[in-house]
Image (cartoon, rainbow, N blue to C red):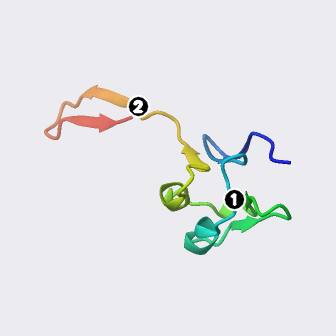
Amino acid sequence: MNPGTVRYPQGDTALLIHRSFCKGCKICVVDCPEKIMALDEHAIAIVTDIGRCIFCGICAVRCPDFAISVDRPPARWAGPAEHIGGLECA
């Protein structure tokens, strides 16, 4: 009863839970600074309130089974700046 990947979007960024990889260890639940992670009735990680997610990536980094990932838009860089400081983020 583990469908593929569940995407929790917020603007251009999303938290992805790869349900077939999750073994329900609760590391993400315990370590989430915003306390938005929980386990569902099948002991699979879910996001309870994506609007409160700060996309810090702690859940993804600490997951031993690579069941969580953060999908961010690619960085956009402007050309060389006219002032000292090199490149600027657009």
Which residue is the extreme one toward the front? Answer: 23
Element at label 1: helix
Residue carrying label 2: 76
Task: Look at label 2 and name its amino acid.
Answer: Arg
Element type at mark 2:
loop
Image position of 41 with respect to 79: above or below: below
83 or 34: nearer the eye?
Answer: 34
Q: Position of residue 59 (x, y in %)?
A: 55, 60
- Which residue is at the front of the view, 35 or 51? 35
The spot of residue 54 in percent (x, y) is 56, 60
Disc 2 crowd, CA 10 A, few/some/many (<14, 14-19, 20+): few
Residue 77: which quarter of the image? top left
Give the answer, above or below, for where 39 lies relative to 79: below
Q: Residue furthest left?
A: 84
Direction from residue 85 to residue 2 in the image, left or right: right
Q: Earlier in the sequence, mark 2 or mark 1?
A: 1
Label 2 close to label 1 by CB (< 8 Å): no
The residue tagged 1 is: 51
Q: Quadrant of residue 35?
A: bottom right
Residue 23 spot, x, y in % from top left: 68, 58
Disc 2/disc 1 C-alpha distance (Å): 24 Å
Position of 49 with respect to 14 (left or right) is right
Quadrant of the image for the C terminus? Answer: top left
Residue at the (56%, 49%) spot, across then down: 66
Three-letter amino acid code at the position of disc 1: Gly
Where is 80 relative to 73, above or below?
above
Q: Residue at x 81, y 42 (%)?
A: 3
At 53% from the left edge and 41% from the top edge, which residue is drawn? 72
Give the percent coordinates (x, y) of residue 28: 60, 65
User: Is 46 in front, or is 90?
Assistant: 46
| Left or right: 83 as drawn, with respect to 72 | left
Residue at 41% across / 31% down in the picture?
76
